[in-house]
Image (cartoon, helix red, strand yellow):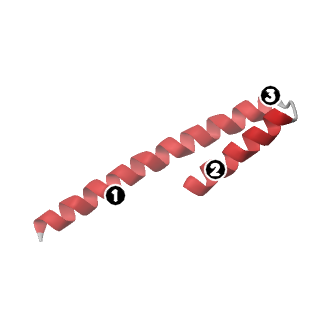
Amino acid sequence: MLYWAVIFFIVAIVAGVFGFGGIASASAGIAQILFFIFLVLFAVAIVAQFLRRSTK
């Protein structure tokens, strides 16, 4: 998922350079949402791993 966030971020930068404001803002918004979803899933995975280790 982080891969897709980076791809949308690159698309937003390229679109911004060429002057496509609507496409750039949409791609940046998608990249931001995917990045935050990745962070939440990463935090959940770390907590789950910590809880799994402490119960053994």
**Residue 1, visible in the rendered structure:** no
Task: Determine whether, in the image, residue 32 is placed left or right of residue 9.
Answer: left
Asked if labels 3 and 2 touch by Cβ distance under 8 angstroms, the answer is: no
Q: Amino acid at mark 3?
A: Gly
Q: Amino acid at mark 2?
A: Val
Residue 22 place in picture, x, y as percent: 78, 29
Mark 2 or mark 1, which is nearer to you? 2
Q: Which residue is mark 3?
A: 21
Reply above or below: 45 against 34. Answer: below
The residue at the far bottom in this view is: 56
Residue 6 - label: 2
Residue at mark 2 to residue at mark 1: CA–CA distance: 21 Å
Q: Residue at x 63, y 40 (%)?
A: 30
Q: Which residue is mark 1?
A: 45
Reply above or below: 41 against 54. Answer: above
Task: Determine whether, in the image, residue 34 is placed left or right of residue 39.
Answer: right
